[in-house]
Image (cartoon, rainbow, N blue to C red):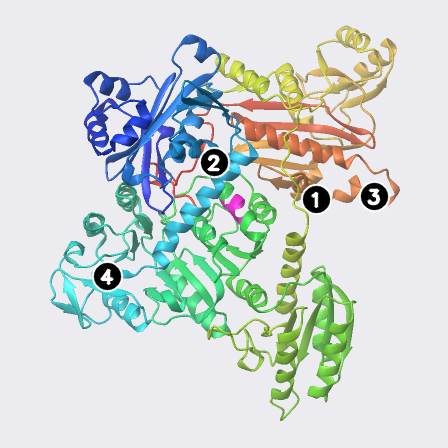
């Protein structure tokens, strides 16, 4: 039942706890019921029911967590909602049907408590074999009926005896999952919005001493033109920086929305309790001394997060730089940065506090304005996923920048980023090169997935992945100031033949097409540039322009800058430049922002190196292509038999609870449940058994040596083909068994011949960090040695599968390379989608390999497969219910 416990967000962004009810909750239940209105009690029990009897309390708090499951939602330790399902008799339980009901305290109705209870009860029911919920609701109880109908399930209703009986199947649907994820987005965004729009801030640890963090936080808030109220909290001072000082947060006379904590690590928990008693919404913990300092610090951080969650608080940090909002209506510098970045259209999330200062300096130097900025430090709670949820619907943010030092929950990140990327480009730096590059303070699950899986996750989600901060800013200044290109053709206009040549070479290497290169000569003036640039942009032969200006002696270039700025403001095609070797958006090339911040839309970005300009443009071209294409659909084929597949896995684990390698027949049956064909084979131990096997299969068979070292080696002579008779089999047996490369104890099997074609391989695995992974590549050592495999994170659309196939460097071999026949690529894509669905449904499959798989012009068939299953404590409940990370209890912080 441990995995049924969850920290959850309500509609308004407040944190609550959801867990199974316990006998120890008896008094809490009585107190909860006393706070519920008579009308709500009547709606729940269909009669006046003022108090609970001792028998009621025992029945409601003591359940078997199988046929009878009950959850409570709590805040500050108090129950605010109760939900339960009951399969009242053997007949109902055998039919997979249970009655569901819940009751929410009136003061908390309308905050999404009922929907959360229903989501988690439905998931618990699925795990216990419940397939349908029924609920009896009074017609006047419109709120309850609305909750059921808004969950995205198909609800059937009948009216009998003045009672509305609602019934719905629990199988997750695209609609129900979409509804859940939309609610998740709104709640997480609301929790962040309350921090950015705080009307009052308390600085705990505010100090009169120069050079202290507490003094800097007060100064930065005041000097940053914060329009709200700043409160200084210092137990030993009467005033700080001209502000009255309060001994505790509770002593503050007004409301406090967020608190900035800058006290020693050992005192942070006490401050948190003080803030909770005051009703503070969010905490920004600047203090260090937590998980970045080792095991004791990690314990301290887990305790801090546990407290913040239990009291309904969101936590940024600890060990962070803070947050910034540049919106004039809510301007907020709750950070250690002494200066506010210019207002702009870019949202920035990073983890390192130390790096945050350098980032803000680079932003200002380049003229790149920010809408909001968050440095999350150890990101114990608030993470990049939360900010993505907020930025998705933030009108002030058009481009998202992420500097990720670790990724705790790639699956959720991929899901959210994919949705956001369709309307707002995301540029990300993943430091360390893989998920194993985890800095101190970031405890994440270990991953056995290769670095290519991280690249695949970014690519699948449409994220623009870059290697360095400089490259991130190079791309960001193009996205923030220029329109997206409609293709990959560029025109080059410049007054330096040498630099133009560098641009052309770099463009071709980056996959861009140089439609034209116009050399104006060293003496070209502003009029020459204007004519050439307007001509290049006017035609339909190019989608973007690279302008090169290397100034001749005694020429400042102001007139050329005026031309670039004027054309850049009007052009519907992107323009990048190498102007005077400058970096960022020079003042001369800026279009004033109407909001009064940094360089505005239409400003022309400049790059100190021509290769940097081309590299940034190429990345934006690829993003534009991704954003414009059809992203496909998630298909669930009618022939998928999830129930039969689950039974195969259950039977295997019943025989071997700790895990089992499936038999050949079990693997074949499992694949058949998802419509994947595999040729059967017969194991043989001598020549006579081989002959008998050939006869039983009707000949036209092959004889294979089945040792592990031969599985993916089509280059070795361990397969004898064209066996049509007993004599053929005896010759094959003698030759293979006499082969010098055959190891002692090698097993042999006989299999029906497969059509000629290309041999490929598929794999699925359950990674501790990524969750399910699907990979595809050509069979054989070259693909393995060169790392030529494509990865995808389920669920996968048909477009994702097509992209995986074409992502291989060896993909031309599938499409008729040098006159060979094109194989059935659609069949490959179909298998990828089916395997992704299988892995989605069955987390117990630890690994499954299909290799070799023969694909030919007429279809595809697996020739060999193996699978391993292991027991799982839970069935990935976060897929179908909303929950915050479980870092408070496990120590794993999720992105």
Nearest the eye: 356 or 640 = 640
| Label 2 neighbour load within 10 Å: few <14, some 14-19, many 20+ | some
Q: Which mark is residue 150?
A: 2
Question: Badge 1: few (under 14), some or many (20 or more) residues near its Cα, within 10 Å?
Answer: some
Name the residue carrying label 1: 808
Q: Identify the residue under disc 3.
A: 817
Front-lying residue, 515 or 509: 515
Q: Residue at x 50, y 23 (%)?
A: 870
- Helix, strand or loop at label 3? It is helix
**Could you tell me which residue is drawn at 83 percent across and 38 percent down?**
822
The mark closer to the camera, 4 or 1, is 4
Mark 4 or mark 1: which comes first in sequence?
A: 4
* Labels 4 and 3 touching (C-beta < 8 A): no
Q: Give the foreground label among 2 and 4.
A: 2
Q: Residues within 10 Å of mark 3 (few under 14, many from 20)?
A: few
Indicate the secondary structure of the residue bearing disc 1: loop
Residue 203 has which mark? 4
Q: Say which label, 3 or 2, has the lower sequence index.
A: 2
Q: Quadrant of residue 304?
A: top left
In-front residue for pair 294/41: 41
Residue drawn at x 47%, y 27% is: 875
**Which label is found at residue 623?**
none
Query: Is 258 contained in the magenta span?
Result: no
For the record, the magenta segment spans 413-417
Q: Residue at x 46, y 60 (%)?
A: 348
Report the Cα–Cα distance between label 1 and label 3: 14 Å
Name which of mark 1 and mark 2 comes first in the sequence: 2
């Amino acid at each position: 039942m441990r995995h049924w416990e969850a920290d959850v967000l309500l509609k308004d962004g407040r944190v609550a706890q959801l867990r199974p009810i316990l006998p120890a909750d008896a008094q809490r239940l009585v107190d909860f019921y006393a706070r519920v209105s008579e009308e709500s009690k009547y709606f729940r029990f269909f009669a006046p029911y003022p108090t609970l009897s001792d028998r009621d309390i025992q029945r409601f708090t003591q359940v078997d967590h199988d046929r009878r499951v009950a959850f409570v939602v709590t805040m500050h330790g108090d129950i605010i909602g109760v939900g339960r399902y009951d399969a009242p008799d053997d007949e109902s339980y055998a039919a997979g049907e249970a009655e569901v009901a819940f009751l929410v305290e009136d003061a908390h109705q309308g905050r999404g408590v009922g929907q959360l209870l229903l989501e988690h009860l439905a998931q618990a029911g699925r795990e216990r074999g419940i397939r349908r919920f029924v609920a009896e609701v009074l017609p006047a109880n419109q709120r309850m009926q609305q909750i059921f109908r808004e969950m995205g399930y198909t609800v059937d209703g009948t009216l009998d005896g003045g009672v509305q009986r609602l019934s719905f199947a629990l199988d997750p649907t695209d609609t129900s999952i979409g509804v859940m994820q939309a609610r998740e987005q709104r709640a997480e965004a609301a929790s962040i919005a309350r921090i950015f729009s705080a009307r009052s801030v308390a600085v705990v640890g505010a100090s009169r001493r120069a050079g202290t963090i507490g003094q800097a936080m007060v100064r930065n808030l005041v000097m940053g033109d914060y329009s709200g109220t700043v409160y200084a909290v210092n137990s030993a001072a009467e005033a700080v920086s001209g502000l009255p000082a309060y001994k505790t947060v509770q002593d503050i006379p007004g409301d406090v929305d967020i608190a900035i904590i800058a006290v020693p690590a050992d005192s942070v928990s006490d401050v948190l309790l003080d803030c909770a008693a005051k009703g503070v919404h969010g905490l920004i913990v600047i203090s260090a001394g937590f998980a970045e300092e080792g095991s004791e610090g990690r314990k301290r951080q887990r305790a801090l997060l546990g407290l913040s969650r239990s009291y309904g608080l969101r936590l940024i940090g600890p060990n962070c730089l803070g947050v910034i909002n540049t919106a004039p209506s809510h301007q907020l510098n709750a950070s250690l940065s002494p200066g506010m970045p210019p207002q702009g259209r870019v949202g920035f999330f990073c983890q390192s506090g130390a790096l945050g200062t350098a980032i803000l300096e680079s932003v200002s130097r380049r003229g790149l304005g920010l809408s909001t900025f968050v440095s999350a430090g150890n990101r114990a709670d608030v993470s990049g996923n939360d900010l993505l949820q907020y930025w998705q619907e933030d009108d002030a943010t058009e481009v998202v920048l992420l500097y990720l030092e670790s990724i705790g929950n790639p699956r959720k990140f991929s899901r959210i980023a994919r949705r956001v990327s369709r309307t707002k480009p995301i540029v990300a730096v993943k430091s360390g090169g893989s998920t194993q590059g985890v800095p101190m303070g970031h405890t994440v699950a270990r991953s056995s997935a290769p670095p290519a899986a991280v690249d695949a996750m970014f690519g699948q989600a449409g994220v623009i992945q870059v290697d360095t901060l400089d490259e991130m800013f190079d791309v960001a200044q193009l996205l923030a100031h220029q329109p997206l290109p409609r293709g990959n053709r560029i025109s080059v206009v410049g007054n330096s033949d040498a630099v133009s040549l560098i641009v052309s070479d770099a463009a071709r290497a980056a996959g861009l097409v140089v439609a034209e290169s116009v050399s104006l000569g060293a003496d070209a003036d502003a009029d020459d540039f204007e004519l050439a640039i307007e001509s290049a942009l006017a035609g339909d032969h190019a989608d973007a322009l690279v302008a090169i200006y290397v100034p001749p002696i005694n020429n400042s270039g102001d007139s050329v800058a005026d031309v670039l700025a004027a054309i850049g403001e009007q052009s519907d095609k992107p323009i990048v430049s190498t102007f005077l070797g400058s970096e960022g958006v020079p003042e001369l090339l800026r279009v004033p922002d109407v909001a009064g911040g940094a360089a505005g839309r239409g400003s022309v970005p400049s790059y100190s190196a021509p290769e940097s300009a081309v590299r940034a443009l190429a990345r934006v071209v690829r993003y534009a292509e991704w954003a414009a294409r059809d992203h496909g659909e998630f298909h669930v084929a009618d022939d998928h038999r999830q129930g039969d597949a689950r039974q195969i896995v259950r039977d295997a684990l019943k025989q071997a609870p700790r895990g089992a390698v499936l038999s050949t027949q079990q693997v074949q049956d499992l694949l058949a449940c998802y419509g994947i064909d595999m040729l059967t084979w017969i194991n043989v131990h001598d020549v006579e058994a081989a002959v008998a096997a050939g006869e039983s299969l009707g000949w036209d068979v092959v004889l294979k040596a089945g040792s592990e070292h031969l599985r993916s080696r089509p280059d070795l002579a361990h397969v004898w083909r064209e066996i049509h008779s007993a004599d053929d089999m005896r010759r094959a047996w003698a030759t293979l068994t006499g082969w010098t490369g055959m190891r002692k104890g090698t097993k042999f099997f006989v299999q029906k011949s497969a059509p000629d074609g290309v041999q490929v391989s598929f794999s699925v695995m359950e990674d501790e960090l990524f969750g399910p992974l699907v990979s595809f590549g050509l069979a054989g050592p070259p693909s393995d040695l060169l790392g030529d495999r494509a990865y995808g994170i389920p669920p996968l659309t048909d477009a994702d599968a097509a992209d995986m196939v074409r992502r291989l460097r060896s993909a031309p071999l599938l499409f008729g390379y040098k006159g060979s026949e094109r194989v059935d690529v659609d069949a490959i894509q179909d298998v990828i989608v089916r395997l992704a669905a299988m892995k989605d449904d069955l987390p117990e499959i630890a690994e499954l390999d299909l290799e070799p798989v023969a694909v030919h012009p007429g279809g595809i068939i697996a020739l060999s497969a193996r699978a391993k299953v292991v027991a799982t404590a839970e069935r990935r409940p976060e897929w179908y219910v909303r929950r915050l990370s479980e870092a408070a209890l496990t120590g794993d912080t999720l992105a």
